[in-house]
């Protein structure tokens, strides 16, 4: 729980400093902030991110936390995530949606129980992957509401993602008869606050 408190504190301080700058933001200031539930990057994760490619590409840096009660150990993660959403449709002047998005992420888990090169306690070649690094992909969509001008944020989006990561997807491919697709796909939901 201490980790969640630290991440949320950093997020609030960042938002506060950006609100003081108002429209005079620096080039390195994030374009948006996100909070996400699940998705193999933590039980709860928060991010700061940037828009590229005429608003169709987002790059986010997440900090995530999985508590011991759920994961068997307190696990902290850092994730670099990129999302591409080629289409946006307006519902009216207030609401719009992105019916399709696709993305990739690279996640690193911190802790002595994880190895980046190869696990030392097993024979050479037993594990061919790093236990601390995961590569994943996802499909999703979102709905966005424009907020009043008096608000600190321009818009708020709710998004969902259906995703998987390298090891479980490889297990699925190797065991098509015994593992079902819903065993390796996860659902994450999140909120994006755009400045």
Image (spheres, rainbow, N blue to C red):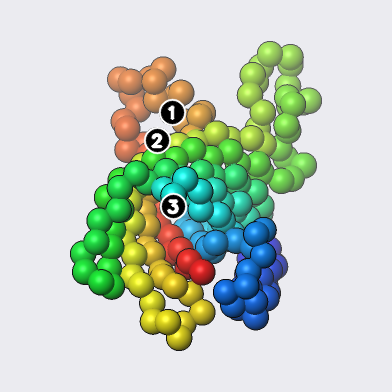
Q: Is residue 42 visible?
A: no
> Is the Cβ of the residue at disc 2 closer than 8 Å to that at disc 3?
no
Q: Which residue is mark 1?
A: 169
Q: Position of residue 155 (x, y in %)?
A: 41, 70
Q: Position of residue 16 (x, y in %)?
A: 64, 78
Q: Which residue is mark 2?
A: 184
> Is the Cβ of the residue at disc 1 closer than 8 Å to that at disc 2?
yes
Calculate the distance from the C-alpha at mark 2 to the C-alpha at mark 3: 30 Å
Q: Position of residue 89 (x, y in %)?
A: 25, 56
Answer with mark 1 or mark 2, whichever residue precedes in sequence: 1
To which quarter of the image does residue 70 belong? bottom right
Residue at the image point whose x is 28% and y is 58% from the top = 97
Q: Determine crowd level at label 2: few under 14, some 14-19, many 20+ residues with C-alpha closer than 10 A.
A: some
Q: Is residue 151 visible?
A: yes
Answer with mark 3 or mark 1, whichever residue precedes in sequence: 3
Residue at the image point whose x is 77% and y is 42% from the top = 112
Compare residues 81 and 86 and report the one nearer the observer. 86
Calculate the distance from the C-alpha at mark 1 to the C-alpha at mark 2: 6 Å
Say what secondary structure mark 2 lies in. Answer: loop
Residue reaching furthest bottom? Answer: 150
Calculate the distance from the C-alpha at mark 3 to the C-alpha at mark 1: 30 Å
């Amino acid at each position: 729980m201490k980790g969640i408190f630290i991440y949320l504190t950093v997020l609030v301080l960042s938002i506060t400093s950006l609100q003081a700058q108002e429209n005079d933001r620096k080039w390195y200031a994030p374009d948006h902030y996100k909070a996400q539930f699940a998705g193999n990057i933590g039980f709860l994760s928060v991010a700061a991110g940037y828009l590229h490619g005429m608003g169709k590409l987002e790059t986010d840096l997440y900090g995530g936390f999985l508590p011991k009660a759920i994961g068997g150990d307190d696990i902290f993660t850092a994730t670099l995530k990129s999302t591409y959403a080629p289409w946006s449709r307006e519902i009216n002047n207030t609401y719009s949606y992105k019916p399709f998005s696709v993305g990739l992420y690279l996640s690193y888990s911190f802790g002595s129980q994880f190895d980046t090169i190869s696990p030392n306690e097993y024979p050479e070649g037993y594990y061919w992957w790093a236990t601390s690094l995961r590569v994943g992909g996802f499909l999703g969509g979102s709905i966005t509401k424009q907020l009043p001008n008096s608000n600190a944020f321009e818009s708020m989006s709710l998004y969902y993602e259906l995703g998987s990561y390298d090891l479980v997807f490889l297990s699925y491919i190797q065991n098509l008869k015994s593992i079902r697709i819903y065993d390796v796909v996860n659902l994450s939901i999140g909120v994006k606050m755009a400045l």
